[in-house]
Image (spheres, rainbow, N blue to C red):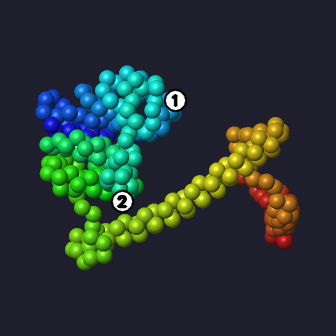
Amino acid sequence: MKIALIGTAPSSIRLAPYGSKDWVFWGCSPGAYGVVPNPSAWFEIHRYEPGQPWFSEGYCKFLENFDGPVYMAEPTPRVKNCIPLPVEELVSKYGPYFFNSTLSWMFALAIESNPETIGLWGVDMAAQEEYYSQKMGCIWFAQIAQSLGIEVGVPPESDLFVPPPLYGVCETNHAFIKFTARQRELQTRLTDAEQRLRVAQEESTFLKGALDDLGWSQQTWMGNMKERGKEFTSPAHAPVLKTLTDQITTLDVLRKPKVTKMKSNGKGAPDVSVDAG
């Protein structure tokens, strides 16, 4: 018998040999129930809470009507084929340290079934919050299975069995040094970008406030209809310019030539005598 453990990682969940009669398929979580076409067992070890985001109406109906065994944390009458997970037996045999994901419980039960092969599809554990805990649990049970002569494998699209860096000594590795330098470069750029973003946000806040103040002023002070717009707008009068204009006019009068008398010159035109003053 070959057992395929199906997770939800999109990189390989659809690559399992679903059409093969050599495999039985064990699935878990609401992310896989609509993808796995012919599961023989299902695992839902979270507290059963219909109506909560994890337990959609469709997923609850799937669990309640599932024809094969549904392994759950406790007896659930609404799920007709519910089987309580044998927690105490598994923990007493394998220890309490690596049951840190649904896949770990699935892996342990698969080992108990003594299959020829255990394969994992849709299982990466690549997110950082899973990397140091859940991934290590899967690797632990994979090594136990191997030690018992069970073949274990994942498709090349999965990085589940890629080992973590060797603590401390990995810092002398060429690739690790390059990755560290690149990380520091990106962190510096990110810090600069965040600083520019803060400045832009402060400017945006100021401009929004200025626009709000301008709008208030416009609505409050623009009610005087005496001040209408004109086709041509003249500058305001300056009193000092009126005084200067009067002075200039006086000077022009004083400098203007005076006409003292007019007489004919016999040619039809008046002869004007000018007093230059």
Q: Residue at x 36, y 46 (%)?
A: 89
Q: Residue at x 17, y 41 (%)?
A: 115
Give residue 20's position: percent from left, percent from top: 13, 31
Q: Residue at x 31, y 68 (%)?
A: 182
Instruction: Say whether disc 2 or disc 1 marks the residue closer to the N-terminus.
Output: 1
Give residue 81's position: percent from left, percent from top: 37, 26
Q: Secondary structure at mark 2?
A: loop
Asked if one can make out residue 76 in the rendered structure from this viewpoint, the answer is: yes
Up/down of 20 relative to 202, above or below:
above
Give residue 277's position: percent from left, percent from top: 84, 71
Question: How crowded is the residue under tag 2: few (<14 C-alpha within 10 Å), some, or many (20+)?
Answer: few
Q: Quadrant of residue 61?
A: top left
The amino acid marked with disc number 2 is Tyr
The answer to whether 159 appears left or right of 264 in the picture is left
Q: Quadrant of residue 179?
A: bottom left
Residue position for label 2:
132
> Quick one: 237 or 158, which is closer to the camera?
158
Distance CA(mark 2)–CA(mark 1): 31 Å
Residue position for label 1:
51
Question: How crowded is the residue under tag 1: few (<14 C-alpha within 10 Å), some, or many (20+)?
Answer: few
Up/down of 40 relative to 132, above or below:
above
Give residue 44's position: percent from left, percent from top: 39, 36
- The quarter in which the N terminus is drawn is top left
Asked if one can make out residue 9 in the rendered structure from this viewpoint, the answer is: no
